Image: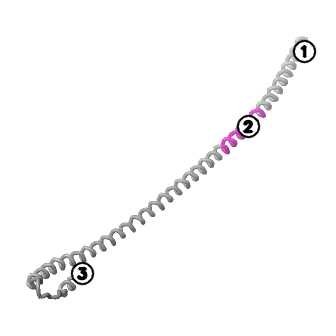
Amino acid sequence: MLTPLEIENKTFNKQMMNGYSTNEVHEFMNTLLKDYETLYKENIEYKDKIAVLNQGIQHYKSIEDTLQNALVVAQGTAETVKQNAKVEADNILKQAELNATKSVDEIKKQITEKELQLNEAQKQFDVYKAKMEALLISQLELLKDMNKDEEQ
């Protein structure tokens, strides 16, 4: 692309016959130079703006990549937390089941001990009852014997 300075310094060879009017060429060149200079400056400004906008795009792409990475990490962390919570819940449930089984076994043991104590108490009661019956029978026999002796 030509620079405004190159256009300004452009010279044309003069011909004797059928040449262009020097004044018209100079006027046209001046007009062309002004328009071209304006366009050239605008073009530079637009290129600078495009460069700045591209930097902004790159910045936002970098932020987007960072956010995507953060999202992936957050999803991974959430999955890990979820798995850990499930493992912990399973452990708590197993512990509760173990404690419940242990409590049931302890209660069954206590019931068995109480049943044995009850059976032992019942046996002792039966023995006591038998002794009392024997004592009462012997006392009754004694009374009968005493009544027989008194009647004779």
The residue at which mark 3 appears reads as 2
For mark 2, give the secondary structure.
helix
Label 1, on which residue?
A: 149
Image coordinates for residue 138, horizontal then vertical, percent: 86, 22
- In this figure, which residue is indicated by the disc labeled 2? 112
Say whether residue 54 is left or right of residue 81.
left
How far across and how far down the image is residue 67, in percent? 41, 63
Q: Is residue 119 magenta?
A: yes
Bounds of the magenta span? Answer: 101-120
Most common SS among magenta residues: helix
Q: Residue at x 62, y 48 (%)?
A: 94
* Three-letter amino acid code at the position of disc 1: Asp
**C-alpha distance separating marks 1 and 3:** 165 Å
- The tag earlier along the polypeptide, 1 or 2, is 2
- Per the image, label 3 sits on a secondary structure element best described as loop
Dot 1 crowding, Cα within 10 Å, few <14, some 14–19, many 20+: few
Along the line of sight, the residue nearer the viewer: 107 or 57: 57
Q: Callout 3, which amino acid?
A: Leu
Of circles 3 and 2, which is in front?
A: 3
User: Is there CB contact under 8 Å for labels 1 and 3?
Assistant: no
